[in-house]
Amino acid sequence: MDSTLVVGLSRWIISEILRIFWSKDRDEIAKVIREITRYKVPSVLVMDGRHLVLRTDCTVAEEILLLLHNTGEAGMTRQMIGKSVPKAPAAVSKAIKKLGIAREILHKSNDRYVLTPKGAKSVREKLSGKLRLSD
């Protein structure tokens, strides 16, 4: 519990220092601060640039949401998602389409998918138990 407090306060201090002394574009500093304060997902392993959900009890759509939650504003391309979700390509495409229709993910102009606020809310409210490694 102590380490969680120290990490949280450290992130806050660094964010405040940047906010006060940053002299460039405000949108850029806002993005940097969001990345500093964002927590990594323990159930997602990143190795050699490949993301992998370590839980085996997730649906394809849930895996995609967890992956996109973990990557934050950087998002993932369709190819990256396909390499990270060990399911049939058709199942991955169907899940991406379903999540897009539900407005939980967004396909940006840079060919990357990111979570929308609605998708982030789904992760927090419906998948919070799947953010951690299973017992």
Image (cartoon, grey):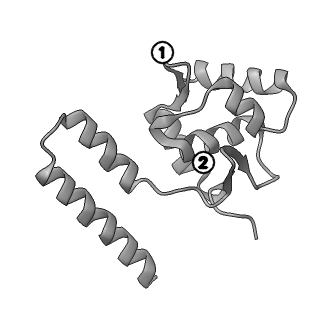
Give the residue displayed 39% in from the left and 72% down from the top.
7
Quadrant position of residue 134 = bottom right
Give the residue displayed 68% in from the left and 45% down from the top.
51
Expressed as whole percent of the image width and height from the top left, the position of residue 34 reads: 35, 47
Tell which of 45 and 57 is nearer to you: 45
Expressed as whole percent of the image width and height from the top left, the position of residue 104 reads: 54, 29
Q: Report the amino acid beneath label 2.
A: Lys
Quadrant showing the C terminus = bottom right
Give the residue displayed 77% in from the left and 38% down from the top.
85
Give the residue displayed 36% in from the left and 77% down from the top.
6
- Check disc 1 and report the residue beneath it: 109
Q: From what the image shows, is residue 5 above or below residue 114?
A: below
Is residue 117 toward the left or the right of residue 134 in the image? left
- Check disc 2 and report the residue beneath it: 126
Is residue 45 toward the left or the right of residue 1 in the image? right
Q: Report the amino acid beneath label 1.
A: Ser
Tell which of 50 and 112 is nearer to you: 50
